[in-house]
Structures are given as C-alpha cells and as structure tokens.
Image (tube, rainbow, N blue to C red):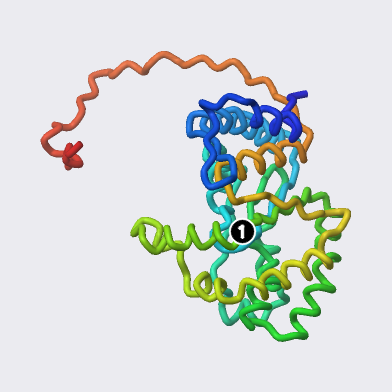
Amino acid sequence: MSKPPNESEFHAAAAESDTADIASIDGPKRISKKRYERELAKLQTELVKLQRWISHNGLKVVVVFEGRDAAGKGGTIKRITERLNPRVCRIVALPKPTEREQSQWYFQRYVNHLPAAGEMVLFDRSWYNRAVVERVMGFCTDDQYDEFLRSCPEFERMLVRSGIILIKYWFSISDAEQERRFLSRINNITKRWKLSPIDIESRSRWVEFSKAKDAMFAHTDIKQAPWHVVDADVKKRARLNCIAHLLNQIPYEDLPYENVELPPKQPHGGYMRPPIEEQNFVPDQH
C-alpha cells in the first residue's frame, strides 16, 4: 500500500531547523517557495495515485471546502486538481441559485453534482451556504435555517450510508490576515474579481459570522462526517497540511501502470500538407 505522509510526519518535517527553508514574517512561520514547491510536488504525486485508486475501485468521494472569505479555499482546491484528470476529479462552485432553484428542496441542486462511481467532487462552498452566509446576510428565513440544521446531519448520514466518502474542511483565518488579503485584492487588478459585495459586507459582520460558524459546528460536526479545521493564516502551509490530511482519509495503493509502446509512425503514402501560407498562424510575439 502506498504510504502518504501522515500529519505527524509532515509537521515534523516542516519543523526542521533548516533556516534556509523557513522564514518568519510577523510571527507565524512561513515556508519558503523552494520548500513549498518540493513538498507540493510530492503530495501531488500521491494525489495522482489516489485518483487512480478512486477510479479503479469505483469510489465516490465528496470533499467540502468552507471558511471565511479569502481563507484560501480556492487556492487549495486549485493545487489539489492541478495534476489530476478533470474527468475523475471535478470542482463544483455554484453561483447564486435561480428563482426555480430557490423553489426546490434546498439540497436538490447540490445532489445533481454528487459523484458517480470512480469520481471525486470538490465543493468550493456547498450546502453550508445556508448555515453561515445566508443566515448572517438574511438570505433565508429563520424557519429555513432551523430546518437546515435539523436536516443537514441526516442528509450527510444518508450520503455516507449510500457509499459516499464525505470529507469536510473549514479554513480558519484571523481577522488581521483576512484584512490583509482583502486589501491585496483591492490593490491588485488581477485579484479584484475575487472581491464581491458580500465579501465587503462580511468584514462588518465578523462576530455574526463567528457565531453562525459555531452553531453550524454544534449541529453538523457528526461522527460520520466530522469537520476538519485548517489553520489558514499561512497559505502555503495550509495547502500542504490540507492535502496531506486528505491523502490520509482514504486508504489507497499505488496501482501499477501497463506497459505502453508507441506504434511506428504511419507512412505518408504520398500525402502532401497544404501550403503553410494558406494557414492563419498566431503571431509570434514572445
């Protein structure tokens, strides 16, 4: 069986006293780019093995990513999927529900995206929108919120009983670090699209979001699908820690590859390609 790095091994490696690989910035230890890329490459190799195991054995995996705005969920998801086959591992990031979807059973539009055998689905925000964002922003009624807290644990137990492996992550970020990341988005045109009106409003409702998250955990941190909290103040460490943890949630083996031999190139048999001048090439500007 392939042996992914467990959490204790990962943290031990990260704590090595190699000062060339570790830099301290304003208190929390940040991992150097060199070390980060080295560790990420190892973990992504293991993710490829996990992907093949999921496909080979027909597993159905759901990974939920939740947390405050700018906590680093999207960046972690991007690194998980970077080397994987999108036909096996896909991302679900749903927009605001349509009028029709608002009239449906709340979980209905999420059920449509659940995995079939041999698939892993990563939810970049999920049905937990109702427990935090909708609750704090007033997008749902008290009755809808109360019903969610009653229904969600049973819904997730039903998913697990059906054979789905359900893994839930909450990315935890400090007030100061969220403010720093928001300012970075405001001042960088390539990141500005990440900043929504709700993100801005969430800053003024920090305590309300905290209370909503606490209530959510109290009702939905169940034995069959517990919450796993990721310390996300240092992005690179959060990504590595989350991926290492994910690899340890699903026992897998490194499946051997079949030998592949390239066939000889087909003879051209008198075939002549059209003149190159007749084709529209992209200008060579770099």
Left or right: 41 in relation to 59? left
Which residue does the numbered mark 1 point to in the structure image? 174
Picture coordinates of residue 235, whole percent (x, y): 56, 46
What is the quadrant of the C terminus in the image? top left
Residue drawn at the location 74% of the way across and 25% of the way down: 3
Residue in the image at 62% along x and 50% along y: 232
Give the percent coordinates (x, y) of residue 214.
Answer: 76, 67
Q: Is residue 28 above or below residue 286?
A: below
The kind of secondary structure element at disc 1 is loop
Name the image quarter holding the N terminus: top right
Q: 124 or 283, which lies in front? A: 124
Q: Nearer the viewer, residue 24 or 200?
A: 24
Q: Residues within 10 Å of mark 1 (few under 14, many from 20)?
A: few
Q: Position of residue 76 (x, y in %)?
A: 57, 47
Residue shown at 81% from the left, 64% from the top:
220
Numbered disc total: 1
Observer able to see residue 115: no
Q: Is residue 207 above or below residue 13?
A: below
Task: Tell me the residue at 64%/83% (across/down).
Answer: 138
Q: Nearer the viewer, residue 54 or 268?
A: 54
* Res. 157 image quadrant: bottom right
Judge left or right: residue 153 versus residue 200.
right
**Picture quadrant where residue 50 is located:** top right
Is residue 160 in view?
yes
Q: Nearer the viewer, residue 146 or 154?
A: 146
The residue type indicated by label 1 comes to Ser
Q: Is residue 244 above or below residue 144?
A: above
61 left or right of 274 in image = right
Relative image position of residue 266 (x, y in whole percent): 36, 18
